Amino acid sequence: MSGPVLEAEGLEVRYGGNLALSVDRLAIAEGELVGVVGANGAGKSTLVNALAGWSRGEPKASGTVRLDGRDVSALRTPDRVKAGLLLIPESRLIFATLTVDENLAHAAHPRHAQGRRAWSTDEIFDLFPNLASRRGHLGGQLSGGERQMLGIARALRLAPRALMLDEPSIGLAPRLVSTVLETIRALVDDGLTVLLVEQNVKATIPVVDRLVLLERGRILAQGPTAQMQDDPRIAEAYLGGSA
Amino acid sequence: MNFAQQALNGLILGHAFALIAIGWTVLLGTARLVNFAHGQMYMIGAFVAWFVMSAWGLPYLLAVPAAMLAGVIIGWIMQRTLLRLTIRQDLVSIMIVTLGFGHLLEGAAGLSFGSTGQILDTPLSLRDIYIGDLWITWQDVAIVVVTIVVFIALKLVLERTHLGRLVRMVAEDPKLALLAGVDVRRVYLGVFAFEGAAVALAAAVVAPRTPILTSMGFQEVIITFVVVVLGGIGSVTGSYLAGLGLGFFTAFFGAYVSQAYATAAMFGVLIVVLALRPGGLAARAGGR
């Protein structure tokens, strides 16, 4: 079996003098859906942001990030995107002043895809029929669920090798949460590699292959979902002791 | 008849104001940046056009692109210097640095072109058009035509092209644009270069109306500031309309009240409009 698609080693992020994240090693295999869970402030967003080389603040990150074995740590965010490492950030995930079509007519052209699969607009609209009827609408006019779908669709157009999603369920009705997570599962079953950050652990467990539990910026435990959901730290804190 | 002449003057002046301001409109709309060297960049554009024609004897049609090239180079150098401040959106430092750049440009122009006034005569500025008692020059016609062409082209580029989409993405959310694979630094560089080219074009087309001095530029910054704010920061259509409105206002105020207080009156209008509509007349993000 080949090595991991996405791998981080000795990844540290500091805000000023404060250590916000310290991950010794994290690896995600091809076609795997890994869920990162943890309380507010555990460092979940900091982790995926550091992997993408991105942040809305100005943190200092160090360590190694590899994509298909290639060290991408020195690459700037747009170059990591072109290499296939994509992040859909929390909350602001689409361009509100651009139409759905314009959001999908992406910046990094598939010529950067280097054999990776870049989804066509037809495939996108097959996957998200709601978006097909909203093509001329501005992103800002879409519902929360439609924005989330457009965020995922935008990423798929960029030919992802590894896709990271930060709290895709945030602000969505429970039924929509299941729809979005099931869509992500279907994409993984179709071959995509995904790192999913979620606070909604109950909704996450049924769809992920592996769970990573973060606490105070460190990986407290990680393993297959079936094993991790019996972990008392997860059961008590996130599943109401119902393991 | 004086009214008709003033209306015509206002129309031409308004297009001149809009053309002078267009670069800053895009700069502010896209990068949320100010450039207080804008006026001195206008002055450099005018002097480069004058120098190319008077010293090298080249035709006006080559002087215009030469001035624009100088504008691009200055814009590019400024943005390279300001890039870190731009990314951090450190507006206070950017204001100070661009003010400093303006003074540097003024000093350099004084050394290169001297401190005496010059006339930028062009084949168009020397040819008159009379319509009854009304008088304009072909240069005035060129101002109106060039402004309309530039505004239409800019709107088409911003709304219909891949490049325009990139600019609008950066305007809305530069951080999110990074995650869409957009090289935001290059967009910022491009926008600054465009500003340099646009203000130099404005100088080459508008400056033949008046004598040019290396100490000029302040008036152009004030006009640009008023047009951009009145038009709604980042709004291309708003800037065009604001420029036109300001042109008519200046022409009529100058003719019927006092030329000396026209700039003060401009600010009066600005204050009243902003008090009534804080977002300007047509605020819209993204340089559209």
Image (tube, coloured by chain):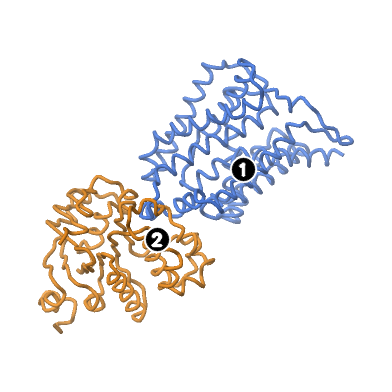
In front of the other: A158 or B260: A158
Residues behind callouts 2 and 1 on a single chain: no
Which of these two is toward me, A168 or B221? A168
Which chain identifier belongs to the orange chain?
A: A
Q: Is residue B178 above or below residue B57?
A: below
Residue B73, how many percent across, how many down? 48, 30
Comparing labels 2 and 1, the label whose residue is closer to the camera? 2
Mark 2 neighbour density, 10 Å: few (under 14) some (14–19) many (20 or more): many
Q: Is residue A233 left or right of residue B220?
A: left
In front here: A2 or B118?
A: A2
Q: Which mark is residue B267?
A: 1
| Location of residue A122 with respect to B46 vertically, above or below | below
Which type of secondary structure does the marked residue at label 2 adopt?
A: helix
Q: Dot 2 falls on which chain?
A: A
The answer to whether A228 appears left or right of B33 in the picture is left
Residue B151 percent location from the top left of the image: 63, 45
- On screen, residue B282 versus residue B128, left or right, reads left
Q: On the image, numbered disc 2 is attached to which residue? A: A157
Q: Quadrant of residue A211?
A: bottom left
Q: Among the chains, which one is blue? A: B
Q: Is residue A222 visible?
A: yes
**Whole-percent x and y of residue B26?**
53, 45
